[in-house]
Image (spheres, rainbow, N blue to C red):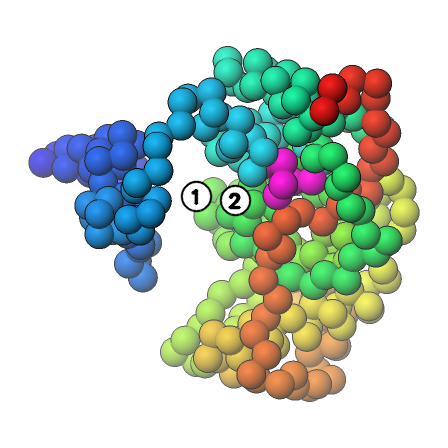
Amino acid sequence: MTGRGPWWGWADGKRALEYLLWTGQVCAAGRRPTFERLYDLPERVLPAAVRARPAPSPAEAHRALLLLAADRLGVALATDLRDYFRLPARVVRERLAELVESGDLVEVSVDGWPSPAYLRPGLAIPRRVDATALLSPFDSLIWERARTKRLFGMEVRLEVYTPAPRRRYGYYVLPFLLGDRLVARVDLKADRAAGVLRVPAAWLEPAENQPDGVLPPPAGAVAEALAAELRAMSAWLGLGPVEAAPVGTLAAALRSALAARRVPDPAVPPSVSPSTEAPSPATATVSSRSGSG
């Protein structure tokens, strides 16, 4: 078996397994700590009741996946819904029209968005969101970068593969969600040899990046909430103190907040990314094309 390159140059065996995965002849059974996917036969992964169900038609499967995406995204453009499960662009337009006609989706317009959006009928929008989370660059809340920019005003870029001198924010940077806004980002490193969670850089998101013009919390409040989340993450990782370098526009405030040494209950894990997205600061207005359902 031959490979091409150290990262994404799959060997022939890997290509064969991925083909069998996409055609349903094997299943993903998990991952190793080093992220390699584990494969197994469907009868050893899927419950018998699942395997006994009739296979849906491609159109039925596409509709079901689009509705699952809508449940998780809240308000979304057609491109957002398509990207969530990597559906073919050529079939999404037709399936969305069918879902609007059946009443399973409602077409809406959102101020400042370039095209019509879609949501589930009766979508509940909370008055406020009390969320606090450090988001992985691979979190579904921010995975689609154009949507992240549209919703939160933040440009998220994975700089792991960028040469160090050309990185803007750091090697492995996590955006910080506070309420319904992305207010900061931090470069993190788990130094297990020293037992320390290191913050090589901390950046406050500029107020002008907020999509609706509403001012975010002041730097001190952001740093205090971020420090608590970093301490919780360090405890969850089995590390000790959190140490921040004096790099970035939030570094001074964060170092002060960490120096306060308010230690949380180590039994409380860090907040995880929400399974559904926080509501957009943008305003949705229902159009007349809401279907017959």
Q: Position of residue 128 (x, y in %)?
A: 83, 56
Q: Position of residue 203 (x, y in %)?
A: 69, 56
Q: Is residue 145 above or below residue 216?
A: above
Q: Position of residue 273 (x, y in %)?
A: 60, 57
**Is the magenta region chiefly helix, strand or loop?**
helix
Q: In the rendered structure, which amino acid carries the disc numbered 1? A: Tyr
Q: In the rendered structure, which amino acid carries the disc numbered 2? A: Leu
Give, as a single range, the part of the protein colored magenta.
Answer: 69-74
Q: Residue at x 58, y 62 (%)?
A: 272
Q: Position of residue 209 (x, y in %)?
A: 79, 42
- Disc 2 crowd rating (10 Å Cα; few below 14, some 14-19, many 20+) is some
Q: Is residue 83 visible?
A: no
Label 2: which secondary element: loop
The residue pinned by badge 1 equals 161
Q: Nearer the viewer, mark 1 or mark 2?
A: 2
Q: Residue at x 31, y 61 (%)?
A: 33
- Residue 140: image tag: none
Q: In the figure, residue 18 lies in which quadrant? A: top left
Marks 1/2 in contact by CB < 8 Å: the verdict is yes
The residue pinned by badge 2 equals 158
In the rendered picture of this protein, how many numbered marks are placed on residues?
2
Q: Which one is nearer the viewer's eye here, 277 or 213?
A: 277
Q: Residue at x 84, y 48 (%)?
A: 207
Q: Which one is nearer the viewer's eye here, 2 or 254?
A: 2
Q: Residue furthest left?
A: 1
Q: Residue furthest right?
A: 214
Q: Is residue 117 above or below residue 73?
A: above
Position of 1 compared to 63: left or right?
Answer: left
- Disc 1 crowd rating (10 Å Cα; few below 14, some 14-19, many 20+) is few
Q: Is residue 278 magenta?
A: no
